Image (cartoon, rainbow, N blue to C red):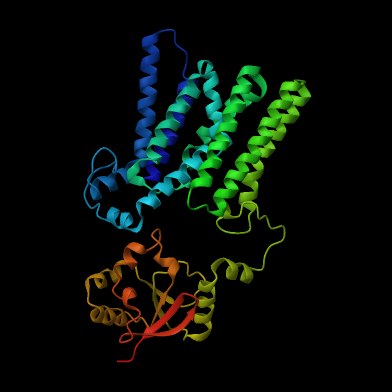
Amino acid sequence: MSILLFALAVACLIAALTERNSAPSTNPSGRAIVGIRNFSVVMAAGLVVASPLLLRNAVFFGNPIYPFIFGGKNTEQLAYFSADYSLTDYVRFRVHEVIVLLGSIVAASIIFGFLRSRSWSSRERFFLVVLSFYLVVYLVPSLSGSHVRYLAPILPVAAVLAGQSLSWWLVESHLPARRHSAMMLLALVSFVIGLVAIVDVRPDYLIQYVTTFAVVSSFVLLSGAIITLRRAEWVVRAVTFSVAVALLVPGVLAVAADRYPPREAAWNLAVLPEDPAVFLDRRLGSDWRMWQWINQNTPPITAILTFEARLFYLDREVVFAASHVLLPTFSMTLKDAVTFVRILGVTYILDSPWSHTPEINRIFWSRSVIFLNLGNQTYFSLVHSEGEVKLFAFAPP
């Protein structure tokens, strides 16, 4: 779905540029024909780019644009995800998304732009339409739990629209508009902070995100006040440059952060590189220590059954428990499933809580008769544990 959205977003962006660069015509009907032709060409190109995904959806789901307009077939897996989250979880997801969408200078600047909507160019209007339609898709209820990274295809459009509005507010707007915009920005910051205060889960990255928004907003308001008091050309240039730097710094810190994912440590900038072993132990904890133990204490020719997918540092053969090879075991008895995996050459079973999370392998893990019965000492024996990460072997017959 994200590929389709990306293709449509790019198509709309190209359509806007094409419309802008079309040869002017004094004939209204001629302009309409040119617009229809350009729109048709660009949409056809977008459909060609998205055709593999559309075809896949048509074959598998019975609807090329599933989950939109009408339902399809083979949709049982959606119930698996629904079972992993409660109504409270879904509400929390949406509150977090509102905070992320509104807690940025980009959103604030687009809101500023409505104060000058009568003077918008046709490109700005088109960008707003594209942005609005994309957000409708992004927030569609059947895709609950949308990830903020799916906004990436539309960020260039949002940035252009916001940049023009912010530039207008800083340099060109009159005093009444400046006051109204400042009040709107303060209200938006207060609203976002209020949402963070009432939500039941506040991850570190969300606190940093909102704090950054509040700090940058304060700097933007201060910059607007300076330009209002002193409109000398050098002042405008200096303030504009300072605002640009202030907008870029959070992104630079996020990219340069010493931990993964960057959003969790945007302010933890490490000047000197950290020792890789120390980094991995701190980042992966018990999982990393278990992999090291396995490398040092098991025979080199060993096959390990696991749902763990982050095994770049495990120097053993891995049989992935969610692969198609293991699907028959999901409908077997425990005895038959154990016999099946032993025939595959499996000697150990590695179980990590990380692999049980809904976004990873919960759908398959919750249906694995082997992993759900690792405590059965008739079939399994604990070999080693690092915290909650455990390594099992098959019990003697």
Report x, y in % for residue 141.
34, 43
Q: Quadrant of residue 5?
A: top left
Q: Residue furthest bottom?
A: 397
Q: Position of residue 179 (x, y in %)?
A: 63, 22
Observer able to see residue 284? yes
Q: Which quadrant holds residue 281?
A: bottom right
Residue 326 vertical position relative to residue 375 in the rendered view, above or below: above
Q: Which residue is at 71% across, 32% downward?
A: 241
In which quadrant is the C terminus drawn? Answer: bottom left
- For image coordinates 29% across by 40% down, the residue present is 68
> Which residue is painted at 41% across and 62% down in the image?
357
Vertical relation: 158 (above or below) 170: below
Q: Nearer the viewer, residue 226 or 172?
A: 226
In-front residue for pair 30/248: 248
* Nearest the eye: 214 or 298: 214
Residue in front for this viewpoint, 34 or 115: 115
